Amino acid sequence: MLVVEGWMPPEELDQAVALFQMGKYKLVITTGGPITSTIYHQKPHAYAPLAREYLIRQGIPADAVVAVPAPASAQDRTYLSAVMVRFWLAKSNQDIDLIDLFSSGVHARRSRELYRLAFGPAVTIGIISAKPSDYDPAAWWTTSIGAKTVITELISWFWTMLLFNPGPKGLARRAVGSKPCGGYAVRVSRLSITKKPLRKANFVAHMCWCFFILSFAADAARLVWRSGFEKGFPSNEWLAFC
């Protein structure tokens, strides 16, 4: 089964189409929450159904694509999407032990970790990273959008690994008629996820870790800036230590 994050641009969704056409998957699930209304989109939309429609137009059979939208949330959107996929699989009585996740560029690593937290150890989460359409991953530091994306995702990945708390392990509570499916419990309340507060005893330690992470990111950025233009910088080398 292939799970495609529906917020990606068409150029990256096309890569998911090519992957499906290789014949490795029988089912594709598109994810994503509501799209904020603008003057260009007056009607309410969500990324999941829009991505499904696009994949169908690009040649994937309609009966092979399922949209699993997530409710609106100001934070933890990827984790909430993973939980909604878990709920849908349980409700559909599908016994899945392997999921391939298709995400965009450097965001893929964090998405994989959040899906692991949502599904627990019983499900293996594979990851396939789409080549970004708005910057060159082999020279991300040469453009503002590339530098912003990589540095922001690096900090976000550290935050996820060190500070993100999905709640107690167990069953989902008050969750749109879901069935037990392992993984971690979340409490879905219309528009947000309620998370277990961090213990006060760990607050100082978390702040020290944050200071260390920011210092490390600043040093890494300075080294990249000094050496990148001279000898190049492979697209994934910045995360080779993970």
Image (cartoon, helix red, strand yellow):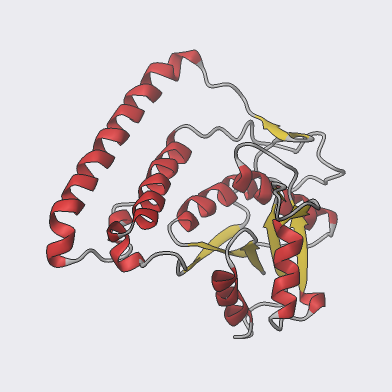
204 to the left or right of 80: left
Q: Residue at x 32, y 24 (%)?
A: 208
Q: Residue at x 28, y 41 (%)?
A: 217
Q: Which is nearer the eye, 106 or 26?
A: 106
Q: Residue at x 78, y 45 (%)?
A: 180
Q: Which is nearer the eye, 126 or 139?
A: 139
Q: Position of residue 213 (x, y in %)?
A: 31, 35
Q: Residue at x 64, y 31 (%)?
A: 168
In the image, residue 203 sits, relative to residue 192, either above or below, namely above
Q: Quadrant of residue 194?
A: top right
76 to the left or right of 71: left
Count the marks. 0
Q: Position of residue 203 (x, y in %)?
A: 43, 18
In the image, residue 197 sits, relative to residue 160, either above or below, namely above
Q: Quadrant of residue 146?
A: bottom left
Q: Which is nearer the eye, 60 or 172?
A: 60
Quarter holding the N terminus is bottom right
Name the outermost residue toward the top. 200
197 to the left or right of 62: left
